[in-house]
Image (cartoon, coloured by chain):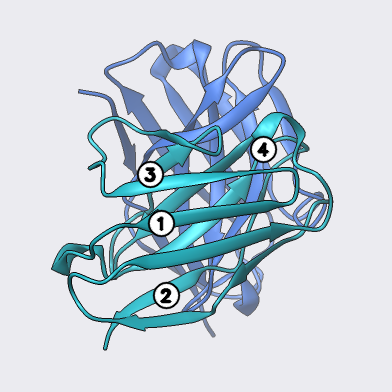
Chain colours: A blue, B cyan
Amino acid sequence: EVQLVQSGAEVKKPGESLKISCKGSGYSFTTYWIGWVRQMPGKGLEWMGIIYPGDSDTRYSPSFQGQVTISADKSISTAYLQWSSLKASDTAMYYCARVVGTAMIYYYMDVWGKGTTVTVSS
Amino acid sequence: EIVLTQSPGTLSLSPGERATLSCRASQSVRSSYLAWYQQKPGQAPRLLIYGASSRATGIPDRFSASGSGTDFTLTISRLEPEDFAVYYCQQYGSSLTFGGGTKVEIK
């Protein structure tokens, strides 16, 4: 069974750093992109960025460029989303998703993780 | 960046009725690279449709979709109780963007 298992909920203070994870199983991790999607409380879906674990090619939405870092460790089939200095406005649910495509192009998100809740509050 | 506008924001219907959801793009979506997702409260989104009209694995045939260029439609032929949810369109022809969503609620 194809699965993406995300790390657990986090509660952080403004200014702290954070790295959340997304572990893939049941498929070849290096031949699909992994995308990250933010959903703020009561709001819609926002695409943040995407990584191809095979060669670590990473693309960011203009809205999130410079705000977060996406990485992957293909040896353990895990992708990451990290912040160096959290803000209260980063409070949201974060989903990872497997993205169908090739090394050069990405398409739609066919398998989703259950999400990681991040709460940033003083 | 391609902006997707979904309408209506909320659709109030009864089980058994037909639902028609619209997704309009600010510019033409290359190769009809448009997907639809369903999200129920407390759950992750689920892929329904890709390539503007192809149903994903396991999606019932009461879900259908069509469109090209800038105008796309998702139709649920007869609403089942489990279909009341929020639906998002997403284009992947030029980077990735999501629409704002349409909530299908029980009337």
How many residues crowd around disc 4 within 10 Å: few (fewer than 14), some, or many (20 or more)?
A: many
Question: What residue is at 35 percent from the left and 33 percent from the top?
Answer: B56
Q: Do residues under tags 4 and 3 come within 8 Å of each other at their CB atoms?
A: no
Do badges 3 and 1 share one subunit? yes
The type of residue carrying mark 4 is Tyr
Label 4 chain ID: B
Do badges 1 and 2 share one subunit? yes
The residue beneath circle 3 is B48
The residue beneath circle 1 is B75
Q: Nearer the viewer, residue A121 or A48?
A: A48
Question: What residue is at 27 percent from the left and 17 percent from the top?
Answer: A26
Displayed quadrant of residue B20:
bottom left
N-terminal label among 3 and 1? 3
Do badges 4 and 3 share one subunit? yes
Can you say whether A35 is above or below B80 in the image?
A: above
State the CA–CA distance, disc 4 to disc 2.
22 Å
How many residues crowd around disc 1 within 10 Å: few (fewer than 14), some, or many (20 or more)?
A: some
- Residue mark closest to the camera, 1 vs 2: 1
Label 1 chain ID: B
The residue beneath circle 4 is B92
How many residues crowd around disc 3 within 10 Å: few (fewer than 14), some, or many (20 or more)?
A: many
Measured as percent of width and height from the top left, residue A12 is found at 49, 70
Q: Is residue A34 left or right of residue A70?
A: left
Q: Do residues under tags 2 and 3 come within 8 Å of each other at their CB atoms?
A: no
The type of residue carrying mark 3 is Leu
Q: Do residues under tags 1 and 2 come within 8 Å of each other at their CB atoms?
A: no
* Mark carried by residue B103: 2
Label 3 chain ID: B
Q: Is residue A20 left or right of residue B57?
A: right
N-terminal label among 1 and 4? 1
Q: Nearer the viewer, residue B77 or B45?
A: B77
Q: Secondary structure at mark 1?
A: strand
